[in-house]
Amino acid sequence: MLEHKDTNSPTMKEDKARGGSRQLLRRLRDIMATGEGAQERLDRLVKIIAQEMHADVCSLYVRRAGDVLELFATEGLKSESVHQTRLRIGEGIVGDIAAYARPFALADAQSHPHFAYRPETGEESFHSLMGVPILRGGRVMGVLVVQNREESEYSDETVELMETVGMVVAEVIAAGGVVRRREQAPVDGLALKPLRIDGVQLSSGLAMGRAVLHRPLVPIGKMVAEDEAHEQRRLDYALAAMHTKLDHMVKTVDDAGGGDHVDILKTYRMIAEDRGWIQRIRDAIGTGLTAEGAVVRVQNETRARMAKVQDNYLRERLLDLEDLAFRLLQHLQESNANGNGQSGPTQADLPKDMIVIARSMGPAELLDYDRERLRGVVLEEGSSTAHVAIVARALDIPIVGRVSRILSRIEPHDRIIVDGNNAVCFVRPGEEFRRVFATSMELHEQRLAAYARDRDLPSVTCDGANITLNMNAGLLIDMPHLHETGACGVGLYRTEVPFMVRSEYPDVKVQADLYARVYEQAEGKPVVFRTLDIGGDKVLPYFQDQAEENPAMGWRAIRVALDRPAMLRQQLRAMIHAANGQPLAIMFPMISDVQELLNAKKALNKELDRAKDRGLSLPSDLSVGIMFEVPSLAFQMDAMLPHVDFISIGSNDLLQFFFASDRGNPRLDKRYEALSPAFLSLIRLIADKCREKGVSLSVCGEIAGDPLHAMALIGVGIRQLSMSPRSIGPVRSMVRTLDAKALEAFLAVNLDSPAHSLRSLLIAFAKDHKIFL
Ligand code: PEP
Ligand code: MG
């Protein structure tokens, strides 16, 4: 099997490799079919692998508790070393294979700086080495190695075959009897202790319940096929069943009102047709695997690719493929179950208070869970723009993401608390802690109920200042919150969000329909449409440009729009069509100088002329505004203000540019404060200028939704705030207990302070004045 310099044609080479692969897999299948004990089977496995791969050595290392790899079986090394030779993960080449979960092939292993020589094995006479991780469900269960006396180059086909063999061996190990089951599962000796693990907030809210492992690892059973044609047919049936089920899901969501939900699912459904992916599974069946074995093989490849991919969009596509692989496996296993009368666990077997734990999850999978039972989700992966996070936020399901190694630290049915507000989860919390948390959950619920009751109360301070509370939105599924919260309108509609969840660029009609639906759902309340703010961390899948050194300060937002005028004009045209004679408010993002605004307005005027020429109804009232996100604007206020109807301060970006502090860098998180005298002074300067010139001003960054920050903003002259829907209630309660004049006077004397932050002063002020924070 080893490919040494071969002059055969590539097809002959492939055929030969396939033939060899089938023969080896068949022999392994025969071993698995015997009733022998685990050790005997492993001994025979390594012998056959060595023979079939023309290797002088084949050794199998199994991962044991404490992150140790133990030599369990060998053909070719000294037999005394079995169960004696142990390496830590990351120690030696074998340890590296486990640590990086990827194959290594070296013609001269001994000269490699990581080679760890173990005299008891007698491996000094073998020069070349190739090893692969033994993977199951993304977890490394061991390492399989072949060695040769001579310096040999291992071909890609040989490495791939070893990976396939590694999968078969993984099933032998998982089937039991090799190491205690407890050693294979959770790790770190932490398994039963209570744990607190931090993550990132993907969807806020609180939940407590029992852990359900998403896609528990079901033993695959048969990995090696008896009849290739039969396996290809089984794959066809399973693919068809999966496609039908996804179609049904798309239709159900569509019938229930649709919106962007459907687009997300449709993209997912399209990926399920990915020809390259399906062909790779077919090819893997061609090497002698069952349909299940082939899906797992391709899934392992996907994971390996994912580990190398940095690009967010590509990672999400790969995650989608991983999700689909699990779906496909389920369908294949259902077809087995139908054949033998068995079936897996159903939703009815799941706890009534589920917290689903997963490495990653697709939006369709989230919708698969019974909404009545699903309380929260914890993910090892995930970003706030991932589809699952967008859907969860709309459905009010708390999610904490990027929780390191949660799957290996939790057992099914363990108790777990998900605190989406503080991006933390507590595994196996003690009884006392649960009681305390249950009380805060209850209070939280009561508060939410109170906010809902108070939604029609005026947002006026006790000294009579009217504070307009608007809501930020980005998807149609956000719109019902407008009425539930009693927000005055949408202060920031992020138009890029619907663009980000689509698989292709929406044309004018699609955009116009979308904005028309926003109007419809706003039921007459005002909406500010922000033109595309792409670039930075907001990547459009179909709009790839070169990677940038510093994307936050790169080619983004209005800079892209002015360089791609057709794109900007199409969006403006869609907005004019959608307004259809109603008032229209348009806001341009990331304006850095007056000329940029004037150029953007020129594009708008051309579109208005075009609409007039075509006899379309023009907006009954047109207001044009800008996002204040770049500090340079502070020095152009007099030149800028005559050209705008309103300004909205995008404090997320403004803060990062003001303090030169990356908003996405966790090491700088909270280092600089919006409550600093410097930043509050800047806001006051903008507010004073706008008041003087009669230009409407609001703040729409994250700080607008935090009661303490919102209070400080009012104290420096802000009268309009736009925030995420769930912040409206808490901010309204704060406003109604605030004396704005007293706070303004208090801040006026403190803005010159050399303090890093006025936070503690403001908290003390709130306490003294009984302000509801
Ligand atoms: C901001 O920068 O504050 C803002 C609202 O824009 P985004 O968060 O979408 O960049
Ligand atoms: Mg911004």
Image (cartoon, grey):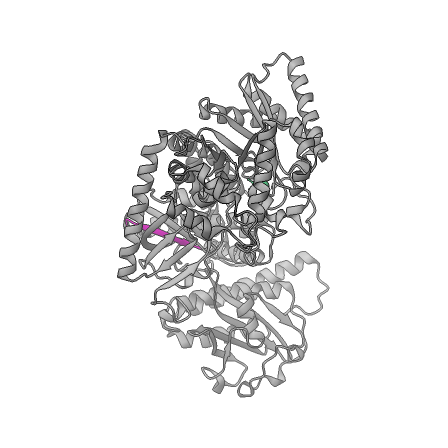
- Name the outermost residue toward the top: 615
Residue 239 visible in the current orientation: no
State the image quarter where residue 432 is shown.
Answer: bottom left
In this picture, residue 637 sits left or right of residue 27: right
Q: Work out which quarter of the rendered image holds the C terminus and state it.
A: top left
Q: In front: 324, or 2?
A: 324
Say if the magenta span includes residue 345: no
Give the quadrant of residue 183.
bottom left
Q: What span is in magenta?
A: 352-358
Residue 508 rendering spot, x and y as whole percentages: 61, 26
Tell me, yes or no, whether the highlighted magenta stretch contains residue 357: yes
Q: Is residue 597 above or below residue 768?
A: above
481 and 509: which is toward the camera:
481
**Which residue is found at the position 56% from the left and 27% from the top?**
510
Q: Is residue 335 above or below residue 596?
A: below
Find residue 528 and report its horizontal and vertical position in percent. 54, 29
| Residue 630 percent across, percent down from the top left | 64, 42
> Which of the 4 quarters of the picture holds residue 274?
top right
The N terminus, quarter of image: bottom right
Secondary structure that dominates the magenta span: strand
Q: Where is residue 745 in the image (x, y as percent from the top left)?
A: 49, 41
Please determine whether, in this image, residue 457 is positioned above or below residue 126.
above
Identify the residue shown where x is 68% and y is 17%. Answer: 609
**Image quadrant of ligand 1?**
top right
Number of numbered discs overlaid on the protein picture: 0
